[in-house]
Amino acid sequence: MRICDLIKDQETYQADMGHTVLETVRAIVERNIGAVPVIHCGKLVGIFSERDLMRRVVAEGRDPRATCLAEVMTDDPLAVGTGEELETCMALMRRHSFRHLPVCHEGQLVGMVLLRDILLHDLNEKDDEVRMMRAYIHSMPDAGSGKIPPIFPCKRT
């Protein structure tokens, strides 16, 4: 599955790099999200996450009302295109230890994929596979007898 299929109905909150940390954190809390793409002149220039808040604002004693995102965001974040496969995105997230990955098309942000979304998609696929296997097993003629029919009948001599 491609990433564009997973994020097609997504509404992505974006922050401008001139926004303060306080107004961005309020938006994060209100929307129950963990990271925000940061935009400047329509282009993705950074990402601001809960980790950035803790490490670059709280731990350094900065005033969130007076600190703008440009000072504390993660610059130039890794992003993927809309045609990327889910497996590739998950591998990038695992390799770089992050849970939020911006998705861009021709330089414009179109969404954010979350590790949680990919894992839930995989879990749903696995559930479907298990249901199909169970249905197949129960549809076999000797399924209720406890006998397992041989895959390769043995010749008796």
Image (cartoon, grey):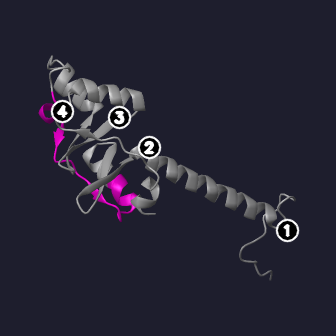
Q: Which residues are magenta?
A: 68-91
Tag on residue 69? 4
Mark earlier in primary sequence (1, 4) = 4
Q: Residue at x 74, y 64 (%)?
A: 136
In this view, the mark in front (1 or 4): 4
Of residue 39 and residue 33, the one placed in the foreground of this image is: 39
> Does the magenta segment cover residue 99?
no
Mark 1 belongs to which amino acid? Pro
Q: On screen, 13 above or below 113?
A: above
Q: Residue at x 20, y 32 (%)?
A: 19
The quarter of the rendered structure image containing the C terminus is bottom right
Q: Position of residue 155 (x, y in %)?
A: 77, 82
Q: CA distance from mark 1 to mark 3?
A: 51 Å
Q: Quadrant of residue 30?
A: top left
| Dot 2 crowding, Cα within 10 Å, few <14, some 14–19, many 20+ | few
Tag on residue 141? 1
Q: On screen, 45 above or below 105?
A: above
Q: On screen, 144 above or below 59?
A: below
Q: Quadrant of residue 153?
A: bottom right
In this view, the mark in front (3 or 4): 4
Mark earlier in primary sequence (3, 4) = 3
Q: CA distance from mark 3 to mark 4?
A: 15 Å
Q: Position of residue 42 (x, y in %)?
A: 21, 50
Tag on residue 13? none
Q: Which residue is mark 2?
A: 116
Q: CA distance from mark 4 to mark 2?
A: 25 Å
In this view, the mark in front (1 or 3): 3
Mark earlier in primary sequence (2, 3) = 3
